[in-house]
Amino acid sequence: MNLIDALANRKSIRSFRPDPVPKETLQEILTAAVNSPSAMNTQPWEMFVVAGDALEKIKKGNVEMLSAGNLPSPDIKFKEKFEHEYKKRQVNLAIQLFQLMGITREDKEKKFEWMQRGFRFFDAPAAIILTYDEILDPAYLAYFDLGCLAHAICLTALKYDLGTCIHSQGNMYPQVIRKHIDIPESKKIFISISIGYPNWDFAANKIVSEREPLEKVTRWVGFE
């Protein structure tokens, strides 16, 4: 698959087969991805790759915290509510997902089941947790660099027939992650990438999220 095709075919996978991903495959993906650009070559990323019993314990701990009504306390604060066209894009995707999954607005039980999927890393057999050192705060450049790295991981994964989902739900309770992975408090948990072989029978994996036409998001200056 060439790069143009990879960019067109990458999508968020929200259900995975249980088949484990070989460590060697993940090593090859990450070896390629760390060639991503970074501001002034700072390479701020530190990755924790987790699978097996440790990941299952994190999934279980996250769901227990969520079910008990504990408020999330992620290392990185982010905007939860959007406005204007940004909200419209978010809502349109949610509508498509809920329609595919047969979730109605009134069905609180199914909505909660859906919410839990993210806290379970979408049942992926492996996850890559991206962190950076707090010494870099305020970390707007590191955020950009980690975004570049995450995209590179997701694109490279396609070469191995793997699917990915970049998400923050798995990071909502960093104390759960740190209980099972030795991530120092000085390392900020930024984002997670669930990775595995896609379960193509899962309805939500069939969705193709819409993109705005180029002319709506681009201004050309100085061209004839």
Image (cartoon, helix red, strand yellow):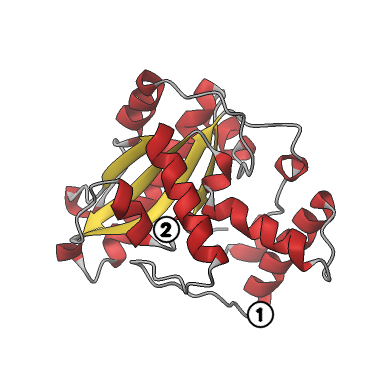
Closer-to-camera residue (215/61): 61
What's the residue type where badge 1 is placed?
A: His
Q: Residues within 10 Å of mark 2 (few under 14, many from 20)?
A: many
* Residue 108 in the figure: left or right of residue 135: right
Q: Position of residue 85 (x, y in %)?
A: 67, 74
**In screen coordinates, is 115 left or right of 24?**
right
Q: Amino acid at mark 2?
A: Asn
Q: Among all residues in the image, which is located at the extreme bottom?
A: 83
- Answer whether residue 114 is visible to the viewer in this image: yes
Q: Quadrant of the C terminus?
A: bottom right
Residue 21 x, y percent position in the rendering? 47, 24
Q: Is 116 drawn above or below residue 88 in the view shown?
A: above
Q: Which mark is residue 171?
A: 2
Question: Residue 201 at x, y = what percent?
Answer: 76, 32
Residue 221 visible here: no
Q: In which quadrant will I find the N terminus?
A: top right
Of residue 211 and residue 99, the one placed in the foreground of this image is: 99
Numbered label attached to residue 84: 1
Residue sitting at x 76%, y 59%: 110
